[in-house]
Structures are given as structure tokens and as C-alpha cells.
Image (spheres, rainbow, N blue to C red):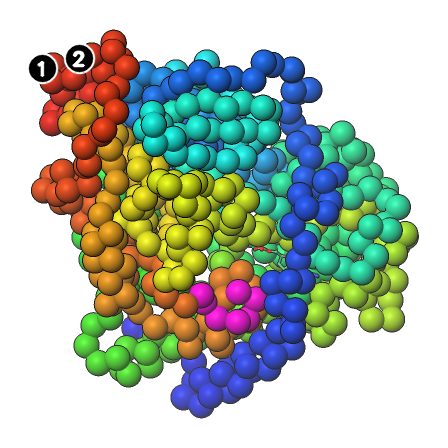
Amino acid sequence: MTSPHAPAPDELAALRRRYRLERERRVRPDGARQYRPTEAEFGYYAADPYAEEAAGREPLHDTVDVAVVGGGFGGILAGARLRQQGVQRVRIVEKGGDFGGTWYWNRYPGIHCDIESHVYLPMLDETGYVPEWKYSPGEEIRRHAVRLAEKYGLRPDALFSTAVTSLTWDEASETWIVATDRGDAFRATYVVTATGTLSEPKLPGIPGIEDFAGHTFHTSRWDYGYTGGTPDGGMKGLAGKRVGIVGTGATGVQVIPMLAEDAGHVYVFQRTPSTVDVRANRRTTAGDVGADRDGWARERRDNYLRIVSGEPAEQDLVADSWTHSAGLLEKLLPSFRRQGDRKAFEAAYEAADASKMNELRGRVERTVTDPDTAERLKPWYRYACKRPTFSDKYYPAFNRGNVTLVDTADTHGIERITEHGVVVGDTAYELDCLIFATGFSVGTSGIHSGKLPVHGRGGTQLLHAWAQRGPRTLHGLTSNGFPNLIQMGSLQNASSVNYTHILDEQAGHAAALVAAAEAAGALVEPSREAESAWVAELAEDAPDHEWFHAECTPGYYNREGRGRPNGPTAYPHGAFAFHALLERWREESIGGILRPRTVRAPAGRWGARGAGLGAWWGVGGGGGRRG
Ligand code: NDP
């Protein structure tokens, strides 16, 4: 059946022209340099509003089995999976004041996860927890992160409000020296890095941004002391106030309806409108998701990954806007297998894309009563150019008398900030409060940014080792010259919109590597040949999405309009196939990554190596001790 939104025969050419014009309106010569990382220049914006005053403590110089950098879901899952393998001393080091990562920092009003909670929240089978909403509020997710950390005994050894400043391999002891900004220099046999991908907030470099005399903050550091209320609303502090918000991405779309409820007047400074699809959040019961059966969460999560990776699936258990639009994610995640004639595929794909975008533009028209505002809220680009968003409250907010949409596309964003407010074109908007929903620097946290230097064998720095030929890893997780270092993240690995699933798979893999190394008394370190083979395998089938991103409106998916970075960055056949590949590799080839240790482990800790150790570390049985 043809969709009611299917493009007319002559519509595609017109759409292509319109998309090109909309892109040209927005591309800035300064590209990603238009932003300023908050930590470097605006310490105030990056400060942790949630942490208790960091209590003084003596620097640590002890030795642990595994140091994990980052206490978000990645680090917690690494810790949990290591504990399941029987590893004793796992020390998570976290910049924030507690566990939670993104869900620790982001507590803005209206915060929800827009991936279904029953697939997003990890280890539901293990904890018996069943989320209460189809799309959980942020606080439910943060509490689940804490629940996991506590269930697996990760709190006693964790260091909070502490940033790792360097990792140095000590050849003599075959351990890593982990240095932090609190003066620690402790040792770890293994290091797992789980520093996240969107963890450093960024601000636009708008002239005069320092001059604003009203109240201001970034959405990832919400100041409830000023606004009052909670993530559920009730911000009495905003009554009668003129509030400006910059940014209409996934965060802005969730915050703006909440501000509209409580503020005197809200000015929404929009540069590029998001696609805003149906949310349909609702309370759920255990019965709705079949949570009475063993393994229900794993089954649901696998089914979801199958669908959003473009794999055939007999049923769609989650059945939401993500899974219904899954085919259109082909350009967003390099995962879909192209079948048959490429030209025919691209033509069908473009028509399906236009149909979806017509549907979404129709949604604006049907909901927003003022035609001029509706026109400005319409997204003119292809579906996967920007991260899709979902809300049933966003468009209705623009029908309220106290919400004004200010379109800044023609001026490439806000032109100037003054002591009193924001200037766009000829108009000055006086504000009491200015909130930045301007997102995060991509790829600037952790070891790939250079901010956390890693010195491997012979003192070689990881980024120097990669400078000539680009990143070199096996499965994105391990690198030659950097023994016992396991890097979680999406580089040369796989990605999915359900990122916690990716992290859990990586965590399980990391724990299996550690267990295998311990059982064999070995180090984890791939050979150069294994790395080269992996990089070649990624390159062989790498899809060419460069042209697609080159035609998209600017954003962090296409380096602000400059296209994607060169070189293969992810497994080309998608996350579902990648996980199967890793499982096979663990069964058949894990021994190939093990190298003999030259240093004997301290007596006692590794004393049981040999007989019985497999049971202690859970090798072979797949289970080991449960934490
Ligand atoms: P984004 O980077 O997606 O959005 C930033 C917004 O700020 C854009 O609308 C951008 O406009 C705008 N902006 C930047 N500079 C200016 C300027 N000078 N003037 C006017 N506007 C400006 O950040 P978000 O925090 O919204 O989202 C980041 C990511 O976090 C998402 O992509 C998603 O992956 C994740 N997220 C996930 C959620 C979930 O439920 N799972 C919820 C929220 C976020 P322009 O588009 O023109 O650059």
C-alpha cells in the first residue's frame, strides 16, 4: 500500500533543491571551531552542581586488579561483568560525584530516555527490575545505574569527583600506573576505559557570551537552586521570568515544554529544527513485556538490535517510532546490508525518506496553529541527517501565548549576547535566564582526545602510535603496544541507537579477555598483524556514506557540514553481526591475543594459577562467581 505521505513524481527533485538551500543557509566557515568546550574556557558551566563538597582524602598508591575509567553505564557494566568472572578488586574512577555518567549529569526537566526502557536499561534479567514506563524518566535510569553498581559491589573501591590524568604502562611490573587529579598514582593489572562519547558539554562561541549578567547554565548542569522544582517540573523559581533556551536537539525538545509550563515567557532560539516523531509514552506492567519469563529482557533487546541493524526479524517486540523507521537509519549507522541493484536501492530509499519527512512535516502543520511558526519548525533535510527526536508535547508548546520561536538560521545562530540578553538580526531579546541546550563535544573525552595521555610499551603514546596510519585496534578494544588496556567505545567497533546494549557486549568481552589472560597467566595484547587484518576487514566493505552526509544540514554527525572523517570507523555489517563475530572469536580465537607475561604475579593473588583457577575466574564455564 502506498503511504499517504509518498512524494509526488516531480517532488523528489524539488525536495533535493530545497534540502541543498537549507544546508547552504547553515554551513559555517568555522565548522566545529564555532564551539568552545566548557571545561577549557567556562569552568563555571562545567562545575558539578550535584556533588557534595568533595571530602579530602589521602592519595592512593595501592594496587588493584582492574581500573575502570568512567562510572557511567560502560564502566558499571565492565565492573559487573568482571565481578561475574570473579575479579576481586575493580576500581572505578569517575569525574562526577556518583555513578550514572550521562544520567548523573543530565537531570534537566523532562529528561527521559527516548529508547524503550525495557531494552535500554541493562541487566534487567540479572536484577529482576522491570521499568515502570515505556520511556523511563532520567531519575529511574540513574537509580538503575546505582542499583547495578551496588549489586556488583563496585562502590567501596570507587573514586568519585576524580579524573584520571594519565595511564602509564610499567614494563618492570607489567602493571598500569593510573594517575589522577587528586594525586593518586595507583597500579592496576588491567585498565578498561569507558569515558563515553557525549560527555563534555559544549557552548557556542557567540560573541559576548561572557557578558550576560542574568542567570545561565548548560542543560547538563541544571541549576534547580535557581529554577526550583525537579525533573518532573514545578519550577516556581521561573515564575514571571524571561527565559531563553538555545538549541532544539534531543535535549531542547524535552526541556522546552517543561519551561513553557513554568516560565513567564520562553524564547526558543532555533537554528535547525529537529524531526519530532510520535512518543506515546505510557506506564507499563511486567505483563506487557512478558517479564515473567527467564531471559525476557535479553530476548527483547536482541530483537530490537536485530531490527535497528536491518536484520530480518519475525516480530517487532518494541514496535515504536525507532523500529518503524529503522530502514531509514541506514545512513546513520553503517549497518544495513544493501541488496541487489544499488541504484534501485538508493531510489527506493530516497522515496521512503521523503515519505517519512513529509509525514513529520505534516505533523507540525497539523499541530502548530500559527502558520509562520509551523513553517519554521519544519525540518528540511533527509531523515538520518540529524538525530531523530520524539515528543508529543513539543509542538503543542508553541501554541501557548508564553512561547516565542526565534529562528536564527539566516544569521548562523545567535549573533551576539549582551549583558541583558540575546541579539538576533535587528531584535534584542531581554532575558533573566539563558539556558544552553547546545550539546556535547563529540570525541573529545577520554583517550582518543589526547586529554588522557596513554603511554604504552617503551613510553609510546597511543595517539602518536596512531598519528601516521590512523587508529589501529583489534575489534576497537585492544591495541598492540598497550597490553592489558581495553578501550570501550564505538571506534572500529559497532554502534547502535541502543548504546547500552553495545556497552554491555563490550563489557562482557572485556571480562572474557581478562578471565582468559588470568587463566593462562598471560597479557592481553593483539599482534600488529591481527590489528592490520581488522582494519583491512573494516575497510573492505566500508559503506560510502560520505556523499549522503555531504548533502546534510550541518551537525555533529557530519562534522558540521564537512562530511564524515576518512577511514573506516565502525564494523560495516552492523552491531548484530558484530556481536556474533565477537562470540565466535571468543570461542575459537581468544588464545591468539594472549602473550606470555615476563613478570611473575605476586604470590597469593595469582597463587592459585593452574589447577582450579579456571573455576575461580569462570573460564570455560561461562559463569564463574556471581557478584
Ligand atoms: P545537539 O548537539 O543534538 O543539539 C544542539 C542544539 O544546539 C542544536 O539544535 C544546534 O543547532 C543548537 N545550537 C548550537 N549552536 C547554536 C547557536 N550558536 N545558535 C543557535 N543554536 C545553536 O545536543 P543535545 O543535547 O540536544 O543532544 C545531544 C545528543 O545526546 C543527542 O544527539 C543524543 O544522542 C543524546 N540525547 C539522547 C536522549 C535520549 O533520550 N536518548 C535525550 C537527549 C539527548 P544546529 O542543529 O543548527 O547545530
Which residue is rendered at x = 32% and y = 44% of the image? 481
Residue 168 in the image: state x and y as whole percent: 44, 34
Quadrant of picture, ligand 1: bottom right
- Of residues 459 and 574, the one nearer the viewer is 459
- Distance between the alpha carbons at the discs numbered 2 and 1: 7 Å
Secondary structure under tag 2 reads loop
**Quadrant of residue 191 in the image?**
top left
Secondary structure under tag 1 reads loop
As drawn, 63 above or below 493 = above
**Residue carrying label 2:** 608
Few, some or many residues within 10 Å of mark 1 (<14, 14–19, 20+): few
Q: Is residue 558 visible?
A: yes
**Residue carrying label 1:** 611
Which residue reaches farthest bottom? 10
Quadrant in which the N terminus is drawn: bottom left
Residue 423 in the image: state x and y as whole percent: 84, 63
As drawn, 352 above or below 220 = below
**Magenta run includes residue 465:** no
Which residue is rendered at x = 24% and y = 45% of the image? 526
As drawn, 328 above or below 69 = below
Which residue is rendered at x = 80% and y = 39% of the image? 238
Magenta stretch: helix, strand or loop mostly = loop
Tag count: 2
**Magenta run includes residue 560:** yes
Which amino acid type is shown beneath numbered disc 1? Ala
**Quadrant of residue 506 in the image?**
top left
Q: Are marks 2 and 1 in contact (CB under 8 Å)?
A: yes
Q: Tell me which segment is drawn in magenta.
A: 559-565
Which residue is rendered at x = 45% and y = 41% of the image? 454
